[in-house]
Image (cartoon, rainbow, N blue to C red):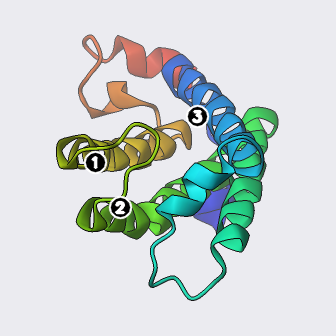
């Protein structure tokens, strides 16, 4: 658990990603609980052995909780970001089912649109891990910086 609770500094892009994902998740969670509830219910795969409405309500509450944690607990961004990545992975089978079953929701009314959405899920996982401070020191540490100067600014 030390890996998830260790405090490490974040780069500006990692913090901006954390804040954007946090706001996005709170908004998505509120939509789950209010005006878009029927659309989200339509996306729950038939093989899920839990009532559709309970799944939508539970995922909405989880999204709000994860989003608020990202926004308000920056010192715990590693744990919350990894948890969000896990959440995105956990809901991915539902997104696959939406494509396979041809379920239309949120304007995803063609197989092409649903397939494009599937391609974005790994990007969300990556963004959540990046917001979590992974890789440590940001992308500059991995060679994306200018001659190592960025690494010193990040560590400093």
Q: Nearer the viewer, residue 135 or 122?
A: 122
Residue 72, image quadrant: top right
Residue 114's label in the rendered image is: 1
- The residue that appears at 67% across and 51% down in the rendered structure is 37
CB within 8 Å, label 3 to label 2:
no
Quadrant containing the N terminus is: bottom right
Mark with earlier residue (3, 2): 3
- Callout 1 environment at 10 Å: few (<14), some (14 to 19), or many (20+)? many
Q: Above or below — where is 143 with respect to 127?
A: above
| Front label number (3 vs 2) | 2
Helix, strand or loop status at disc 1: helix
The residue to which callout 3 is attached is 21
The location of residue 91, given as percent across then percent down, is 48, 64
Q: Is residue 47 left or right of residue 21?
A: left
Separation of residues labelled 1 and 3 (CA atoms)? 21 Å
Mark with earlier residue (2, 1): 2
- The residue that appears at 57% across and 54% down in the rendered structure is 40
The location of residue 122, given as percent across then percent down, is 32, 49
Q: Nearer the viewer, residue 127 or 63?
A: 63
Residue 71, image quadrant: top right
Quadrant containing the C terminus is: top right
Helix, strand or loop status at disc 3: helix
- Callout 3 environment at 10 Å: few (<14), some (14 to 19), or many (20+)? many
CB within 8 Å, label 2 to label 1:
yes
Q: Is residue 7 left or right of residue 152?
A: right
Residue 98's label in the rendered image is: 2
Answer yes or no: is residue 134 visible: no
Helix, strand or loop status at disc 2: helix
Separation of residues labelled 3 and 2 (CA atoms)? 23 Å
């Amino acid at each position: 658990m030390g890996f998830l609770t260790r405090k490490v500094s974040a780069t500006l892009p990692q913090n901006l990603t954390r804040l954007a994902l946090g706001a996005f998740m709170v908004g998505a969670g509120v939509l789950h609980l209010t005006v878009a509830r029927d659309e989200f219910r339509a996306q729950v795969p038939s093989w899920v052995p839990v009532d559709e409405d309970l799944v939508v309500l539970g995922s909405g509450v989880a999204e709000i909780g994860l989003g608020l944690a990202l926004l308000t607990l920056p010192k715990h961004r590693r744990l919350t970001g990894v948890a969000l990545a896990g959440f995105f992975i956990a809901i991915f089978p539902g997104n696959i089912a939406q494509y396979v079953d041809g379920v239309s929701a949120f304007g995803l009314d063609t197989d092409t649109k649903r397939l494009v959405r599937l391609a974005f899920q790994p990007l969300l996982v990556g963004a959540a891990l990046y917001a979590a401070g992974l890789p440590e020191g940001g992308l500059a540490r991995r060679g994306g910086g200018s001659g190592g100067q960025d690494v010193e600014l990040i560590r400093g």
